[in-house]
Every structure is written in structure tokens, then in C-alpha cells.
Amino acid sequence: MPSVRLAKVTKRFGSITAIDNLDLEIEDGEYLCVLGPTGSGKTTLLKLIAGILKPDQGEIHIDGKLVNDVPPQERNTAYLPQDYALFPHLSVIENAAFGPTSREIDREQAIEISGKMLEMTRLAGRAGSFPNELSGGMQQRLALARALASGVSLLLLDEPLGALDARLRVELRYKLRSLVKDEGFTAIHVTHDQEEAMVVGDRIAVLRHGQIQQASIPFTIYNEPKSIFVANFVGGANFLEGFISERGPSGSWVQLRNGLAVRIKETGYSPGERVVLAVREEMTEIVKPAKRNGETNVFAGTVTSASFLGSLIRYEIQLENGDVVNSRMPVSLRNDSVLSGERVYVRLQPENIKTYLSPSGGLYIELEAV
């Protein structure tokens, strides 16, 4: 199983810097998900590792070997591109068996290996078809089956489940991760789907403007985001702007607009510093007036909308100071008395609030995906 290391890698296309002085390490047998918005450099990163592109600066190592000048076919990698790159003159089973047969594996064994991959991707019934006879989703599954059957030890997967319908995509997430781990592959899986990344990845690397914003296990990425961008892109959050009005040994007070004051546990900022508070929607509680009991961080507001999201209901609440927050709760815990136009109270627990220094370019620039 190969390890992968990128050291100070930069790739430019004219005036555009797609990958910017990037450092990244992937361990033997690790399943890494690279998560980022469109245009963040995800596909370029895979192509650099695959050898399709050469870096302008920096070094790429696979299994301890510098591969900057090693051609793609000698890197022991299988790259699954977004455009599938299937062989139109070969049948489904022949496409899937291309990897094993190119490694001079006995044809019968190659067909057996590829048949298992077609079973996993639910294409066994179309083994004799040709790519132009398949739907887009089927073509993507065939490309995935071919990559998995290739026999290489490093898989480079560019949105491998992106064209599938929602139900099949969820099903294949688990099967794909299970197969990669069972067979001992090292996998780098690019996606813009945060839920997919959370499910399949041992670690997640969040990419923006060609730079790694944070790389860690899914739990840490979600619960301890290092930046406003990561907090917003992974899971979403409410953001409130203000300044530190008081600081004590066990917490601080943040003054929001129009005099609203929020208690936080953070003590690392000085009075007068401008900050942004972030709190997850599912940790933004709606409480009835009778349950206030003089609690800190309970604010009056009005429900401006309630949206049914299947297993969740999302409420939008405008606070009395004009700020808007969202609250998500499971349908099983819904409060039928919380309707659009209702007056409610919102509770923000100090331990659930993350604090960031206000970005110099403004909050909305920091929240932008690209």
C-alpha cells in the first residue's frame, strides 16, 4: 500500500493558481476525502498525483519515491476522472477487465475480478452492453468498477458517485469504503458532498483556493472547524458579528448590533476586538417563553419561515436586534406550536459557540465558496 506526500506543490494555469504551495500527506491504507467547492483545485490535485499534470514547483512522493518525472503508467495508480473515459468499442465486462488484462492476468481470472466489481456496482446484468447503451449514472458506475478492478494500490477518485441518483449514491458510499478498506487500497476521493466525505473518509482535507484549510478526522472537522470558511462549508452554521465588551477568567461577553449581548466561553480575545460567533443550526435551540427562567443567552425573536426537510425541520428566526438565525430539529422533536409568524425564544449555549477574529475582508467574503 502506497503513501503519498506533497511538499510545497504549486500548479498554475496562466494567471490562475490552481494549487498553491500545498503540503499534504496520505498514509498507507488511508481513505482521504478531499472536500471543497467547485474551482477549489480538487481535480488538479488528483491529476498531479496521477502524473497527468506536472507541478510548477514542489515535490510529489509516492511510497517514498519522488515521482515528478515518472509517467502516469508507472505510478501504480488508477485515476477515475469525472468524464469516465470509457472505451466505446469494448463491452461493459471488457471495460471492467481492462486493468487486470493489461497486467497480463489470465483472462478467466480477469473476468472473475471484474465481474465482482460489476456486481458491487449493480451492473452485472449489463455485462454485454456497450458504454453508449448505458445511462450517465451507469457509465459512472462502470468507470468505478474498472478502477476498482485495476489491481493498483492507489485509487484517485474524482467525484466517483456524483452522477448517481440519491438512493444509489448513499448505498454505494458504504460499499465503496468497505471494499477499499478490505482490499487494502490507499484512496484519495474528491467530492463537494460533505455528507459523503463524512461517511467514507478516514480523514477529510478541506480545500479552498488551492490551499488546505484543515485536514483531520470527520469529527474534528465538524466540531472544531479552524476557520469561518470550514465552519460554513462543512455542516453550515449561524454567524453573528460583534465585539468583545468584557473579558473574565471564565468567559467573555460579545456585544452584537443594537445592544444584544452574548456570553461565550472564549477568553483569548481582548475587549474591543471584533469577532464572529458561529453556532451550528442543530445547536441553536428554540425554547418556550415559560422555560426562560432568567437564563443567559436566551433571545426573543420571530419565526419567519419553517421548512420541512424530511427528517428535519428548519426554522428561520429573526432576533429582536435584526440578526437572523436558523434552527434545525428532528421531526420527532418538532413543536407544532412553532409556526411562521410566532414569537419564540432562541437559546445559545456558551459551550456550543465558536469564536473567530473578524476577517479583514468582511464576513461574507470569508463565507464565499470560491
Image: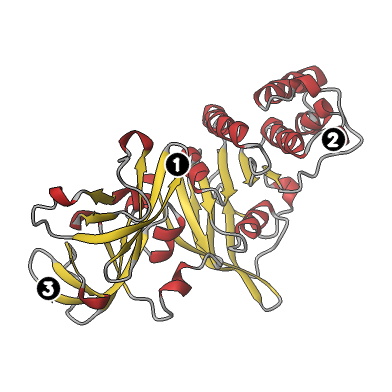
Mark 2, residue position:
131
Report the side of 77 relative to 286 (left or right): right
- Cα separation between marks 2 and 1: 33 Å
Mark 3, residue position:
247
- Cα separation between marks 3 and 2: 65 Å
Where in the figure is residue 116, as x and y percent of width and height?
Answer: 68, 21
Q: Residue at x 27, y 71 (%)?
A: 321
Where in the figure is residue 80, as x and y percent of width and height?
Answer: 70, 44
Instruction: Confirm whether residue 217 shows in the render.
Output: no
Q: Residue at x 23, y 55 (%)?
A: 345
- Cα separation between marks 3 and 1: 38 Å
| Residue type (three-letter) at the residue carrying disc 2 | Pro
Mark 1, residue position:
202
Tag nearer the camera, 3 or 2: 3
- Nearest the eye: 60 or 307: 307
The quadrant the C terminus occupies is bottom right
